[in-house]
Amino acid sequence: MIFVRLLFAACILCEAQVPEAGSKMETLVDKALNSRGREYFEAERAYRLAGDLSALPQAPSATNMDPLSALILQVLRQWKQPEAQEFDQALEYLDTLPARIANTPITSPSPSGISGYLSMHFSWRVADLMAVHLIKQTDWPQWRVSGVLLYLREQARPSITAALIRFVSETQDKRWIAVALDTIRAAQDPDLPAKVYAEERHAATKSRPLPPALKELVKPR
Amino acid sequence: MSAAADRLLARTDIAKAKAAAAACVLPCKSDPPVQALDVRVRDTFKGGTPVPNADVAILPAGGGAVILTGQTDSSGDVIFRLPVGSYQVTARKDWHGPDPASQDNVNVPAYGFPVVNLVLEEIRYHLHTDADRDGAVDASRAGLDKWEWGKGKKGAIVYANNDDDGGRSSPDNTDAVINTGNDPDDIAPFEIRRVGPHDPPASWEGFLEVAAGAEQFIRIFDSRSAGANELIGPATGAKFKLPDLKFSKREFGIEAVRYADSTWDGEAMLTFTLNANGPTAAEQAKFRVAPWMMPNHLDAATEVFVVDGGAFNSRYRSDLNTMVTAAGCTLNEFASGDIWMQDCMEIGFSNLPSTGMHAVMRNPRNRPLKVFAKTLLKADFGYHEQGSLVPSSTFDSTGNLECTPPVKNFPWGRIYFGPGRVLEEMDDETKAFLKQQIVQKPIEIDTNFLAVGHVDEIITFVKASDRKGFRLLLASPKRAYTILTANKAAHGSEKMMIGRSFPAGSAEVTIKDFLDVGVLGQSAASIKTFNDNAQASIDGVRATFKAELGLSEPDIIDVPGLFIPNADSPTFADALTAGMVNMLVVNGHCIVPKPFGPVVGGKDLFEEDLKSSLSSLPVTVSFLDDWDEYHVKLGEVHCSSNTLRTPTRAKWWEFKP
């Protein structure tokens, strides 16, 4: 985290940010990186409303930033891009889905249906967002977790593997873990070993072991 | 030496000694007198038959240290040589009473040979059940410890006694007593019977026991009368010591706390152990809980349930009432905001050899109608819950749970359902429960192409007088396109779905435009492709039923119907025209969703096609407009209703898995 803050400070200097704005952005980004649940989503929203793209560290992949932080910053960055409109549409779809099926015989939104809808309407373009939200959420109903997981499996790509690694590391649900592992494998991420090792370091800070299934992913064959 | 030989020898010895003594002239020195005792042990309950191997002891009169012991031979006798005196004679034998048999103050005079007759009677206790499944406890005890399927086989049956004879508003098998009313009839009997006329020694002990854990599934009562208490069961544990054995016959009652399910295979072994002051004996009897079974669309119906949604569906209910009444049923309305009556419960049945009852299953569906099933609970109408309400998927709804008519090897048909999609499967516990009922072995049907995913959207059965006794009706986009295409040239300007709309807009379209342009913002080509894919899925269903039920093409009727992508799950299908297959079949009356198909010459071609297909069958066809009330909400007539049917009393135990 200190490293991110240093990067952030460096960016502020190089971009000659207004000190107050920079401080506010620093807080928001800090929250986005380190919080979960409501606090994260409030930070993300506040960033969308007030954020300045230049306030974010540039090209995170070129730094030593941990892969998951890089993904989160990437999504924050995308909120300032034209695709943000699709972000809103995708999230609105998920948010309003229960109400739309309430009068039908369908008792719970279909995870496969969600996957199909998101893929049909947004292809891979909301995958990073969904991946970040998947690990930041703390109170999603099962259908939403399952639906987003299936969507990510359908749109498997290297950019989302860091989030799925964290998801596997933290969830207990074996079926979700299986889907996430499938997705990680399908993504064929050349940086997978580095991401798994980064997760191992993160897990160590939480005094928990890395799940064996993740170690298996990078085991030489 | 046998007692007979010894008796002869004793007589000789006594006679010789007596003669010698008589020959002796005083003063003379003679040998001491010779005398013997003849002990005879008999079982008078068995007609005075000898009791061999009984342990006989000679004690001083009034008791004391044992002087002599012996054992009866095969004649039940034993001979003792004794000094002149007065004695106590006892005899005992395992599994016999009294313990011991005794005679005191037996005088053995000089040169005497008295006979002592002792009575020992065998005492045995045995388990008896209704293993031959005729409704009465059997005299025979053969094969009690097995439970075998099939006619003429053995194995006792218990009820999952989940009706409410006691008027407690909860199933009778949820409390630890036999309730009032006719609850005793729902309790299966078993008995412990004594062989022998007398009570055993007080030291004897009897125990009833089930395997550890089985007491969670089985409850044994101290009788079969109202008010009888639990001896073994969830509240009292797995073992019970009988307070005494002072009975020649004692009846107990047994019920099941649940049906066979994911946690229990439905069988319980009861062990009766008798500890006869040393020796022990154990007997076992196996019980199986009667399965919960589902009726099929051909079974007689008496009542139809529908939700009273107020003004929303008042016209629909009125029309439905007319049709249901014509079919000989009554319409029962229940006020709720949850309109999918079909999806909240499955009314099945269960029976013993002597009695039977309906039993409604509340499935895992967390919607307001989850409370409805329990309102049906009453005397001889059971209630049970399967699966947990949260989480639930659309595949847990009972519109996705139906039963075929009887087919070869399955006299009560086969349950069928759609097992669900990845991370959206039908509840595992419910699936396991259905499978464990065994007699209606479930068939899994792939309904994954449907947004709602229920089997009733694409499958139903109606009665036939020929062939298998029924026809399988399958939704058929192919049939719909055949009809549309055949009418395009001559009647292309005629319309379908006249005056009908969805939230996305008007669905009214000409035949030609539907085939060439499309509808509801979907191109004709994409709709055609979508329906071709739906047909391919239904063809898979067709193949499954052919294989599992032994059907051939003449057993199947294609019912025209069109599908369209679901708005929120566009890879899955909704019915575009109202799904006629999703009909209510009661007593041979088919109450069919009005399809709003293409109308030519004032006639709906889809309706005409169905009527034609069913014309040779012993059924009537009525069309009911459910478009605004149910169709646009992704359901049809069948989804709106539920049915109470009267199944044939099933000798399910004669089934051969």
Image (cartoon, coloured by chain):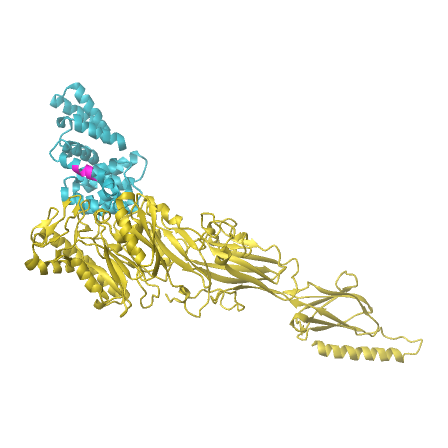
Chain colours: A cyan, B yellow
Q: Residue at x 55, y 56 (%)?
A: B223
Rendered-image quadrant of the N terminus of chain B: bottom right
B289 left or right, relative to A204: right
Q: Is residue A184 visible?
A: no
Q: Residue at x 76, y 61 (%)?
A: B65
Q: Nearer the viewer, residue B500 or B546?
A: B500
Q: Is residue B585 visible?
A: yes
Rendered-image quadrant of the C terminus of chain B: bottom left
Numbered range of the magenta stretch: A89-93
Q: Residue at x 65, y 57 (%)?
A: B203
Q: Nearer the viewer, residue A185 or B444?
A: B444
Q: Nearer the viewer, residue A48 or A35?
A: A48
B617 left or right, relative to B203: left
Q: Nearer the viewer, residue B604 or B222?
A: B604
A9 left or right, relative to B406: left
Query: Residue B218 in the image: x percent, y percent?
Result: 47, 55
**Placement of B162 over or under A32, stated as above or below:** below
Q: Is residue A91 magenta?
A: yes
The residue sitting at the left extreme is B489
Counting labels gives 0
Q: Is residue B630 magenta?
A: no
Magenta span dominant secondary structure: helix
B58 left or right, relative to B524: right
Query: Residue B310 in the image: x percent, y percent?
Result: 29, 43
**Placement of B132 over or under A119, stated as above or below:** below
The residue sitting at the top extreme is A19
Query: Residue B194 in the image: x percent, y percent?
Result: 60, 64
Identify the image quadrant of residue B532: bottom left
